[in-house]
C-alpha cells in the first residue's frame, strides 16, 4: 500500500472513531494529512463516520484541488497550521461538545484556555490559545491561526471548536481527544474549588517529557 493510500485509509478509520465517540456529528469536522506532493483533506459536507478513502480530496502544494471530492471549505484552518509548523503532518478540526462548550464561556484566559488540573493537557497539548470569534467560513480565520500556530500545537476557536496539529495523524487525533477530556473535566469541576498544578509541577513535567 502506498503512503497516500495508507493515509486515506487512516483518515477514514480515525474519522469513524471520532464520530462513534461523539466528537463529530452530522457533517461537522475535518481531517487532513500531509503528503510528499501535497496533502489530503476530508471533503466538504462529509460525515467523518462515513468517509470513502478514495473520495478524500487531494490538494497540491499550492492548494489546487487535484483529486477526490471537493475539499472542506475550512481548508484555510489546516493551511494556517501547516504554513508555520513544518513538523506538523496532520491537522484535526472538530466541533467536539465539551471543547465547544468551553469555547463559549466568557472570561477565559486567552493564552491558555484550560487550567492545568491534570498533567496530561500539559504533556500532550501545551498552552491552548483562544482565537477570537469569526463567522464560519471566514478565510481571516486562517490568518488568525497562522499568527499563533508557531507557538501553539493546538488552538481553540471561540464559539466554534479546536484546531489541532500533530507530528502524525495519530498524534493529532489523540491530542484532540485529550482536549475534549480536559474540557469535560473542567466543566465538571466548574463550581468547585480545584487544586491546579503549580508552576513548579508544570516545569517538572516539561523538563521530564519535553514541550507538547
Image (cartoon, grey):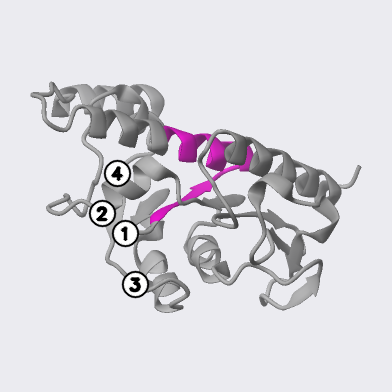
Residue extending farthest to the left is 193
What quarter of the picture does the C terminus occupy? top left
Q: Earlier in the sequence, mark 3 or mark 1?
A: 3
Give the residue number, with chain letter if any, for mark 4.
127
At label 3, counting other C-alpha atoms closer than 10 Å, the crowd grade (few under 14, some 14-19, many 20 or more) is some
Separation (CA) of disc 1 from disc 2: 5 Å
Query: As displayed, is residue 196 above or below residue 133?
Result: above
- Could you say where residue 41 lies in the image, as x and y percent from the top left? 67, 60
Q: For numbered disc 3, what is the local secondary structure?
A: loop
Badge 4 vs badge 3, beta-carbon distance below 8 Å:
no
In magenta, the rendered stretch is 161-178
Check residue 104 in the rendering and tell me which mark sits there, or answer none: 2
Q: For numbered disc 1, what is the local secondary structure?
A: loop
Circle nearer the viewer, 2 or 3: 2
Check residue 134 in the rendering and tell me which mark sits there, or answer none: 3
Separation (CA) of disc 4 from disc 2: 18 Å
Q: Residue 180 occupies which quadrant of the picture?
A: top left
- Could you say where residue 88 lies in the image, as x and y percent from the top left? 56, 51
Circle nearer the viewer, 1 or 4: 1
Residue extending farthest to the right is 1
Q: Earlier in the sequence, mark 1 or mark 2?
A: 2
Residue extending farthest to the front is 26
At label 2, counting other C-alpha atoms closer than 10 Å, the crowd grade (few under 14, some 14-19, many 20 or more) is some
Q: For numbered disc 2, what is the local secondary structure?
A: loop
Identify the residue at image location x=67%, y=56%. Answer: 34
Q: Earlier in the sequence, mark 4 or mark 3?
A: 4
- Could you say where residue 202 lies in the image, as x and y percent from the top left? 23, 27
Check residue 159 in the rendering and tell me which mark sits there, or answer none: 1
What quarter of the picture does the N terminus occupy? top right
Amino acid at each position: 500500500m502506498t503512503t497516500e493510500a495508507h493515509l486515506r485509509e487512516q483518515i477514514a478509520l480515525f474519522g469513524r472513531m471520532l464520530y462513534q465517540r461523539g466528537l463529530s456529528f452530522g457533517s461537522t469536522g475535518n481531517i487532513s494529512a500531509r503528503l510528499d506532493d501535497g496533502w489530503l483533506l476530508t471533503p466538504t459536507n462529509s460525515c467523518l463516520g462515513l468517509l470513502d478513502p478514495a473520495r478524500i480530496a487531494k490538494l497540491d502544494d499550492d492548494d489546487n484541488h487535484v483529486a477526490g471530492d471537493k475539499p472542506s471549505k475550512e481548508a484555510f484552518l489546516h493551511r494556517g497550521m501547516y504554513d508555520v509548523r513544518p513538523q506538523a503532518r496532520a491537522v484535526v478540526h472538530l466541533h467536539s461538545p465539551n471543547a465547544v462548550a468551553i469555547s463559549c464561556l466568557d472570561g477565559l484566559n486567552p493564552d491558555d484556555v484550560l487550567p492545568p488540573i491534570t498533567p496530561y493537557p500539559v504533556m500532550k497539548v501545551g498552552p491552548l490559545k483562544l482565537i477570537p470569534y469569526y463567522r464560519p467560513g471566514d478565510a481571516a480565520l486562517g490568518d488568525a491561526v497562522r499568527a499563533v500556530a508557531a507557538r501553539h500545537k493546538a488552538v481553540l476557536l471561540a464559539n466554534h471548536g479546536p484546531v489541532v496539529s500533530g507530528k502524525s495523524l495519530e498524534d493529532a487525533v489523540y491530542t484532540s481527544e485529550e482536549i475534549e477530556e480536559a474540557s469535560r473535566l473542567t466543566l465538571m469541576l466548574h463550581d468547585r474549588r480545584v487544586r491546579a498544578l503549580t508552576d513548579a509541577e508544570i516545569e517538572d513535567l516539561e523538563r521530564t517529557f519535553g514541550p507538547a
